[in-house]
């Protein structure tokens, strides 16, 4: 099923400045991959796709989040070079790419978590439901409530399971115990953790296993009633069984929430996402329906990465 | 020589070094522990007989008067009140400074001068702080008083509490702060609800150390609270303290008072120990850490 390139790809190691400019939009997306491969002379150079290049299927969706020529630098290190991306509402979008390609940075920019880092310089903007995320007047607190985050390493607070889940409500000033109980139960059920913890809601969250802790963090994020869930390699510290549970959970969350997930695991992206963006060196190289990215990638670089031959 | 023989010889060497280092650790730990036990044991041996009911129920009675030598109730009560007052002033200021240094310090030009001043203040001999207290709080008022004693002790506490608070808050994983911020909490709420409670156990330990330190101070009180033979908690007047009383008794000529001084030391150390232990136990049961 998977097409394999016959020739060995040379890993592009030349600096970004040395590369030719982006190709015109649409040129590579609509062309036959075989032709594309024949046309490209080896070694293949990046980026092959213009930043404005949007897959027609992605374009046809209702977008909840739009990234407009977004650039980010940590001090002098340019981490993101003009990202353009539209994220479909109610779907699962995976960001894949080798370590250091900027996918986590992109994810963390979506709810302005990079604000906490010193020396971050940002150009361009992102829009959440049409509203600018980086505008001066944006209420960052409110924004972060709408774009919840699940981190790579599960990070429950040193409190009881219950207090962890209702944290967002507590800080919002919710006093009603009935409401807290209700949201706690609902969120834990959504995170497929309720049955395992319902008898020990008031014991420490640290008594849970790694997989349970990660699902607790998902429940905690869900309890804030976000519209988007940003997941930064949520399974990288979990064993296969716990990973499977979290993946099933992500699958169930689609529709109710928009999920953007960063993952190093190709199979995970293939299993649980609707759309996949392949990033490399701070650029989006190819973005489209997950099946297309994994089965019929347009670019050699994407194919090489998803088949595990580089990265 | 076969490979197994080489690895065996290396193994033996590694084992000998490891064993040697381990025994060094055991020896020195034992040495420190036995020193501590020796001091405490000596104290108990000498002081124990004078820790009587009268010690806790009577004030000091001068030589020759009926009931001599009395007890140390005035000093004991005085120290508790002084330390309590110092804590009320010193802990909030010190903790807030520590929170500032740890949580807001990175983006502030103030942080490194504040840290430097705190370090210098922590190293100032307490007698110097006592003279400062005398100049600022005794001379203008006109007489030795309890306020001056308490504020001087608070002054000693602040840098200790500030620096330990800073160190302890820095140990709280950054991921807690991130998670809280990502859930829409403000920085202040994150600090109050997540960062400080996570470090509660060690913060309490830091505060305890500062309290224990000032509870044992004598020099700054010589110039400020002065001490009193009376059972008084009126901070406008010269104020009694256990340490000052111990100092007077230990340097005085009377045998009965010297024994009483030993008892006073024993009681002071036990107080600090029990206080420390109970607060730790409370912290543990409440936060699951300590």
Image (cartoon, grey):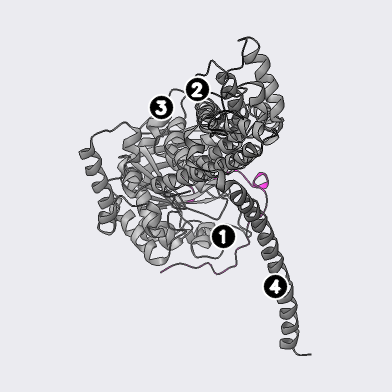
Q: Which residue has dot 2 on it?
A: B232
Q: Are dots 2 and 4 on a single chain?
A: yes
Verify whether residue B124 appears in magenta: no
Q: Which residue has dot 3 on it?
A: A139
> As drawn, is B255 to the left or to the right of A246?
right
Residue B199 visible somewhere in the drawing: no
Say which of A109 and B127 sits in front: B127
Labels 2, 3: front one: 2
Q: Are dots 3 and 4 on a single chain?
A: no
Labels 1, 3: front one: 3
What's drawn in magenta, residue-wise?
A1-28
Secondary element at image label 3:
loop
Verify whether residue A9 appears in magenta: yes
Residue A267 visible somewhere in the drawing: yes
Q: Which residue has dot 4 on it?
A: B19
Q: Residue at x 47, y 58 (%)?
A: A236
Chain containing the residue with disc 3: A
> As drawn, is A86 to the left or to the right of B244?
left
Question: Alpha carbon of mark 2 to alpha carbon of mark 4: how far?
Answer: 59 Å
Q: Are dots 2 and 3 on a single chain?
A: no
């Amino acid at each position: 099923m998977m097409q394999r390139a016959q020739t060995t790809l040379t890993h592009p190691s030349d600096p970004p400045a040395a590369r030719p400019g982006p190709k015109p939009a649409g040129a590579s997306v609509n062309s036959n991959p075989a032709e594309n491969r024949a046309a490209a002379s080896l070694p293949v150079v990046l980026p092959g796709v213009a930043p404005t290049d949007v897959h027609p299927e992605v374009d046809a969706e209702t977008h909840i989040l739009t990234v407009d020529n977004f650039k980010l630098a940590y001090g002098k290190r340019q981490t993101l070079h003009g990202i353009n991306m539209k994220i479909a509402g109610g779907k699962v979008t995976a960001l894949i790419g080798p370590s250091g390609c900027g996918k986590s940075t992109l994810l963390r920019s979506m709810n302005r978590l990079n604000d906490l880092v010193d020396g971050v310089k940002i150009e361009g903007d992102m829009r959440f439901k049409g509203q600018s995320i980086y505008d001066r007047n944006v209420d960052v607190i409110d924004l972060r409530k709408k774009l919840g985050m699940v981190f790579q390493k599960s990070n429950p607070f040193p409190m009881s399971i219950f207090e962890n889940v209702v944290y967002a409500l507590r800080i919002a000033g919710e006093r009603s115990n009935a409401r807290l109980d209700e949201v706690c139960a609902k969120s834990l059920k959504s995170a497929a953790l309720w049955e395992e913890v319902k008898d020990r809601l008031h014991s420490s969250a640290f008594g849970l296993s790694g997989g349970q802790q990660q699902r607790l963090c998902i429940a905690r994020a869900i309890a804030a009633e976000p519209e988007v869930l940003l997941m930064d390699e949520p399974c990288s510290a979990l064993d296969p069984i716990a990973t499977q549970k979290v993946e099933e959970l992500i699958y169930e969350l689609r529709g109710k929430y928009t999920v953007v997930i960063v993952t190093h695991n190709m199979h995970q992206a293939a299993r649980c996402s609707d759309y996949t963006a392949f990033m490399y060196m701070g650029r989006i190289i190819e973005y489209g329906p997950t099946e297309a990215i994994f089965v019929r990638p347009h670019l050699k670089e994407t194919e090489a990465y998803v088949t595990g031959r580089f990265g | 020589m076969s490979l197994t023989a080489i690895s065996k010889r290396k193994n033996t060497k590694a084992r000998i070094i490891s064993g040697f280092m381990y025994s060094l650790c055991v020896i020195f730990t034992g040495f420190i522990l036995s020193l501590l036990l020796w001091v405490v044991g000596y104290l108990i041996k000498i002081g124990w007989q004078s820790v009587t009911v009268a010690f806790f129920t009577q004030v000091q009675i001068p030589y020759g008067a009926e009931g001599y030598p009395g007890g140390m109730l005035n000093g004991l009560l005085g120290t508790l009140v002084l330390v309590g007052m110092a804590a009320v002033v010193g802990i909030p200021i010190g903790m807030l400074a520590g929170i500032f240094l740890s949580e807001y310090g990175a983006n502030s030009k103030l942080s490194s001068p504040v840290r430097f001043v705190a370090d210098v203040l922590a190293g100032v001999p307490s007698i110097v702080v006592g003279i400062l207290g005398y100049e600022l709080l005794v001379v203008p008022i006109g007489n030795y008083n309890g306020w001056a004693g308490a504020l001087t002790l608070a002054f000693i506490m602040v840098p200790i509490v500030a620096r330990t608070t800073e160190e302890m808050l820095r140990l709280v994983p950054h991921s807690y702060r991130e998670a809280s911020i990502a859930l829409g909490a403000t920085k202040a709420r994150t600090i109050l609800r997540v960062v400080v409670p996570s470090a509660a156990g060690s913060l309490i330990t830091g505060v305890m150390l500062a309290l224990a330190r000032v509870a044992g101070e004598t020099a700054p009180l010589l110039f400020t609270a002065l001490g009193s033979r009376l059972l008084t908690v009126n901070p406008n007047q010269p104020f009694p303290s256990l340490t000052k009383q111990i100092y007077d008794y230990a340097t005085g000529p009377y045998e009965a008072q010297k024994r009483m001084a030993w008892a006073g030391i024993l009681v002071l150390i036990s107080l600090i120990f029990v206080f420390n232990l109970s607060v730790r136990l409370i912290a543990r049961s409440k936060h699951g850490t300590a």
